[in-house]
Image (cartoon, rainbow, N blue to C red):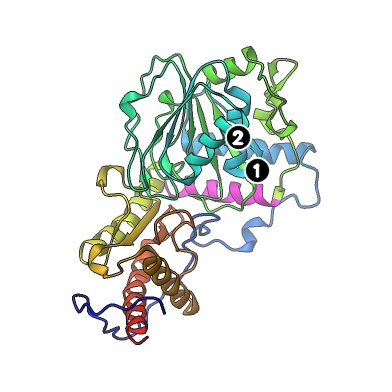
């Protein structure tokens, strides 16, 4: 064991092991927990063994697009497509297809936004790029963003637990495009589509679907850019949204660029149908808020832990990120990382919670997914296990 602390400010008495376990102990941030009541029978109508280009296959994909529109409610003149390679593919499609005519501003405050900035500078080699950066737990200063430039940002930082509270800082009238990675915000937070020209997400997040597929939503301004801008670089096939200089309308009707999994599409349709059944987007947001509230109340009375996001107004309700507080007596990052790893191991060994460790590039701690498919009772059942594992880990360290 790496930690040796003589401090007695925090009790090392582990106490009794909790008895109650989450009914669904899955707290991964992607693929996330399946909807309540889900079973393999939900996929019984999947068109397995059928072509996605068949009439029936196209109808399934068109149904998924229509249900996405019905739940998220973007403006009618925004187009929706299912695209390859999860949210990553959808973001890269937007960057490679749309950037170039204007300078680019990028907001960076966690790992994925850092990736987008790196791709813009190092892969697309756009030298007229400005990067506005903040450390984990904070947001950059948006007041310096120039909306005559294109603007690339995330609505919700999945790996930092920090979100933008609203889009008030984005003007309705602007010359540049706003390209928003919304993968852990869509279906959990209210997106202001009037301020967004490109919205991307993967259905493996808040709706707990299976991985590998992305969704891209484009405003009329983004569609105009597609038809008036020819990128200076070769465009891989999986990024191509135009044919002979015109938007490929068929992609927005259920024709995909490459072969999708119709099993995964059926799973997405099932969860969208569940979302409609429970009350649509307002209820999905309310469920996510309720889950995050359970953790907030626990953190308030738990001295060894704190939110990574210090400002409650920018704190994510879906990807809730926690770190050790100064009262934990874990003095170095190595100690904190080892303790967090040990705690996750102990809780997973008990079957009381899975996949809730912090993202590998984030400060050591925990990331508990609280999206709409998670039940608040399961979040509440996980938290005593964190207390138990923390105290037991300290006992182990002090015995070294």
Q: Is residue 276 magenta?
A: yes
What residue lies at 65% left-to-right and 28% top-to-bottom? 252
The location of residue 229, given as percent across then percent down, is 63, 15
Judge left or right: residue 99 versus residue 173: right
In this picture, which residue range is highlighted in magenta? 263-280
Judge left or right: residue 53 versus residue 183: right
The location of residue 112, given as percent across then percent down, is 50, 43
Q: Can residue 22 be seen here?
A: no
Badge 2 vs badge 1, beta-carbon distance below 8 Å: yes
Q: CA distance from mark 2 to mark 1?
A: 9 Å
Viewer-side label of 2, 1: 2
Q: Is residue 358 magenta?
A: no
Q: Which residue is mark 2?
A: 92
Of the two numbered discs 2 and 1 on the same chain, state the one appearing first in sequence: 1
Q: Which residue is mark 1?
A: 85
The location of residue 218, given as percent across then percent down, is 55, 26
């Amino acid at each position: 064991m790496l930690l040796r602390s003589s401090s007695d400010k925090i009790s090392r008495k582990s106490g009794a092991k909790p008895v109650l376990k989450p009914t669904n102990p899955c707290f991964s941030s992607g693929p996330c927990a399946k909807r309540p009541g889900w079973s393999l029978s939900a996929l019984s109508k999947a068109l397995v063994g059928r072509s996605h280009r068949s009439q029936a296959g196209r109808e399934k994909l068109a149904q998924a697009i229509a249900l996405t529109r019905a739940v998220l409610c973007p403006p009618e003149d925004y187009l929706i497509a299912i695209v390859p390679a999860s949210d990553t593919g959808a973001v890269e499609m937007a960057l490679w297809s749309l950037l170039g005519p204007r300078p680019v501003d990028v907001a960076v405050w966690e790992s994925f936004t850092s990736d987008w900035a790196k791709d813009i500078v190092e892969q697309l080699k756009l030298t007229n790029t400005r990067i506005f950066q903040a450390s984990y737990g904070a947001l950059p200063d948006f007041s310096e963003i120039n909306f005559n430039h294109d603007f690339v940002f995330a609505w919700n930082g999945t790996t930092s637990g920090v979100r933008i509270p609203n889009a008030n800082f984005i003007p309705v009238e602007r010359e540049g495009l706003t390209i928003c990675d919304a993968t852990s915000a869509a279906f959990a937070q209210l997106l202001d589509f009037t301020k967004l020209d490109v919205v991307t997400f993967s259905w493996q997040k808040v709706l707990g679907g299976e991985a590998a597929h992305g969704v891209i939503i484009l405003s009329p301004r983004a569609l105009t850019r597609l038809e008036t801008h020819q990128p200076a670089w070769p465009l891989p096939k999986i990024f191509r949204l135009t044919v002979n200089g015109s938007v490929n309308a068929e992609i927005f009707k259920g024709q995909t660029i490459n072969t999708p999994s119709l099993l995964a599409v059926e799973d997405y349709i099932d969860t969208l149908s569940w979302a409609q059944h429970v009350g649509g987007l307002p209820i999905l947001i309310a469920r996510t808020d309720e889950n995050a509230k359970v953790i907030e109340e626990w953190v308030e009375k738990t001295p060894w832990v704190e939110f990574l996001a210090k400002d409650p107004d920018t704190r994510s309700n879906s990807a809730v990120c926690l770190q050790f507080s100064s009262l934990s007596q874990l003095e170095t990052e190595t100690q904190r990382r080892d303790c967090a790893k040990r705690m996750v191991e102990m809780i997973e060994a008990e079957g009381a919670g899975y996949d809730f460790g912090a993202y590998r590039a984030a400060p050591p701690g925990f990331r508990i997914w609280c999206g709409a498919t998670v039940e608040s009772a399961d979040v509440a059942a996980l938290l005593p296990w964190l207390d138990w594992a923390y105290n037991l880990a300290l006992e182990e360290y002090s015995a070294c």
